[in-house]
Image (cartoon, helix red, strand yellow):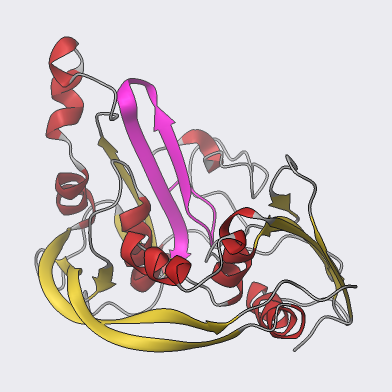
């Protein structure tokens, strides 16, 4: 698939990143009328086009094979698809074609055995209280729970304001609450997507990728809350620290989702850039 027409131009210094759809690995697609508009560095377009959810090691591997401008210079892309694509993955395929055509991107995936955390069920066959199959909850076109209010799909606001499965389908939301309490969640997500999301959560990179070894197929709804101490904080200096020191991300995964992170070694796909150029003129 390819865009019917596309314009790619270097952005002015100081321009803000953004676009008419989220560039994450989620599947939610707003109404675009077949238009794609975005202003990001090449690295972001690569992650979007190939649906990459990278930990620090994988991101470092890609950046080392790219020229420096690929991570800093932003490019404004204005494109129109033929018709009105129904899925985000269709836009990803069109972006792959644009990267090959305009940036002369050549790439491949390379599998390596590396240290990972395996996302595993604490008790086989048993889900935690805040994890459920999506089919057991409300469909995506209605709020999950609460007072029935429906926020803008990209607003990051919990539907109904409840901590129990409050989030939108096809994307991850992240809220940082007072006293450094964190809430994340999503609906209609696979376990593989959840595994890829975990290394991005506070307090920061885990030092290795997370791979799904739960054995759970299908899609799920979940909510997860925990606490963390920011790098510039002093946990011993305030009276509110015991609450979030005890509720770590690892403990929250076990108690709320029935999942734990098991250190092991497993094959992981690494995205490798073989060739890239500055984009051709419009």
Residue at 48%, 71% in the rendered image: 52
**Residue 42 quadrant:** bottom right
Image position, residue 162 (x, y; %): 44, 37
| On-image quarter of the C terminus | bottom right
Residue 114, x across and y down, in percent: 20, 76
- How many marks the image carries: the answer is 0
30 or 118: nearer the eye? 118
Where, by quadrant of the figure, is residue 78 drawn?
bottom right
Query: Where 13 falls versus 77 (above or below)?
Result: above
Residue at 17% x, 11% y: name it: 237
Q: Is residue 247 above or below residue 53?
A: above
Viewed as shown, does residue 158 lie left or right of 220?
right
52 relative position to 89: left or right: left
Whether residue 107 can be seen here: yes
Q: Which residues are magenta?
A: 164-188
Residue 111 occupies which quadrant of the picture?
A: bottom left
Residue at 45 percent of width and 37 percent of height = 175
Up-down relation of residue 152 to residue 90 (above or below): above
Q: Which part of the image, by quadrant, shows the N terminus?
A: bottom right
Closer to the camera in the image, 237 or 89: 237
Task: Decide which of 6, 162 is in the foreground and name it.
Answer: 6
Q: Is residue 164 visible?
A: no
Relative image position of residue 131 (x, y in whole percent): 30, 58
Residue sitting at x 32%, y 65%: 57
Residue 124 lies within the magenta run: no
Left/right placement of residue 104 relative to residue 78 reads left
Residue 232's x, y, as percent?
29, 24
**Considering depth in this image, is 113 or 69 the residue closer to the camera?**
69
């Amino acid at each position: 698939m390819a865009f019917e027409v596309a314009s790619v131009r270097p952005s002015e210094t100081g321009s803000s990143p953004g676009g008419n759809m989220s560039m994450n690995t989620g599947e939610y697609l707003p109404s675009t009328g077949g238009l794609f508009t975005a202003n990001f560095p090449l690295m972001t377009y690569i992650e979007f086009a190939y649906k990459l959810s990278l930990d620090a090691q994988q991101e470092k591997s890609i950046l080392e094979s790219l020229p420096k401008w690929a991570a800093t210079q932003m490019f404004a892309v204005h494109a129109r698809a033929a018709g009105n694509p129904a899925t985000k993955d269709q836009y990803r395929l069109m972006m792959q074609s644009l990267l090959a055509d305009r940036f002369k991107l050549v790439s491949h995936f390379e599998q390596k055995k590396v240290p990972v955390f395996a996302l595993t069920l604490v008790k086989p066959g048993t889900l935690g209280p805040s994890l459920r199959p999506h089919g057991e909850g409300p469909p995506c076109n209605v709020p999950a729970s609460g007072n029935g209010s429906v926020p803008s799909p990209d607003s990051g606001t919990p539907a109904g304001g409840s901590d129990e499965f409050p989030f939108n389908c096809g994307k991850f939301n992240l809220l940082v609450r007072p006293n450094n309490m964190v809430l994340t969640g999503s609906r209609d997500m696979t376990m593989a997507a959840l595994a890829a999301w975990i290394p991005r959560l506070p307090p920061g990179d885990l030092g290795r990728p997370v791979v799904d070894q739960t054995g759970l197929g299908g899609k799920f709804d979940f909510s997860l809350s925990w606490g963390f101490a920011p790098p510039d904080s002093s946990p011993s200096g305030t009276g509110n620290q015991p609450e979030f020191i005890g509720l770590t991300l690892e403990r929250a995964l076990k108690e709320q989702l029935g999942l734990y992170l098991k250190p092991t070694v497993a094959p992981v796909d690494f995205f490798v850039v073989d060739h890239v150029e500055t984009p051709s003129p419009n």
